[in-house]
Amino acid sequence: PAGAKRSLVLHIPPVTCPSNESEFEEDRFIAEAEAAEKARLEEEVRLVEVRRLAREARVAEEARLAQLKLQEEEARKIEQLRIEEEAAEKIRRAEIKRLEAEVLAAEEARKAEMARLEEVARLQNEAAKFAEMAMLSEEKRLRAERKAIEEATARKAAEEKAAEEARLAE
């Protein structure tokens, strides 16, 4: 079995002894079997080590792939955030432009209203001047009319007085 230790006890019979030839043959066979077993065990240990190294390499590769996947996901999230920030910036700029346009339109409307009010005030002033001039004209006309009436009344009174005096004189 793997990891088991065996002690090799080799019994080497003397070569000169013909009776020990079969024993020598048996010992050689045992030594070869033990050497083959040792080589098989060493091969098994080497295979176990190769499998362990392959497993470690596979685990390391899986970890590297997982790390790459995490990095790709992080890069995708960062790119998504960048895209969202750009979109938000575009929206913010559009909102600023819209508000600036509203402010400009309100300012233009205010200026137009001020100009309209100034024109209304000017026209009202002109109308007031015309009304005042008309009123002054009417007053003048009424004074002239009154004066004419007074003069006519005075003339008539003078004529009546003259006629009365002429009648009294006759």
Image (spheres, rainbow, N blue to C red):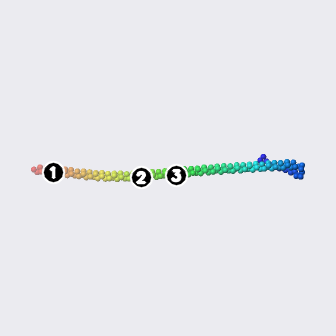
Residue tagged by mark 3?
A: 89
Q: Earlier in the sequence, mark 3 or mark 1?
A: 3
Residue tagged by mark 1?
A: 159
Which of the pair 29/156 is nearer the observer? 29
> At x 24% / y 51%, what residue is drawn?
141
Judged from the image, the secondary structure of the residue bearing numbered disc 3 is helix
Is there CB contact under 8 Å for labels 2 and 3?
Answer: no
Within 10 Å of disc 3 (Cα), the crowding (few <14, some 14-19, many 20+) is few
Residue tagged by mark 2?
A: 108
> At x 20% / y 52%, what residue is drawn?
151
Q: Position of residue 74 (x, y in %)?
A: 60, 50
Judged from the image, the secondary structure of the residue bearing numbered disc 2 is helix
Is there CB contact under 8 Å for labels 3 and 1?
Answer: no
Judged from the image, the secondary structure of the residue bearing numbered disc 1 is helix
* Residue type of the residue flagged with mark 2: Glu
Identify the mark at residue 93; answer none if there is no mark.
Answer: none
Within 10 Å of disc 1 (Cα), the crowding (few <14, some 14-19, many 20+) is few
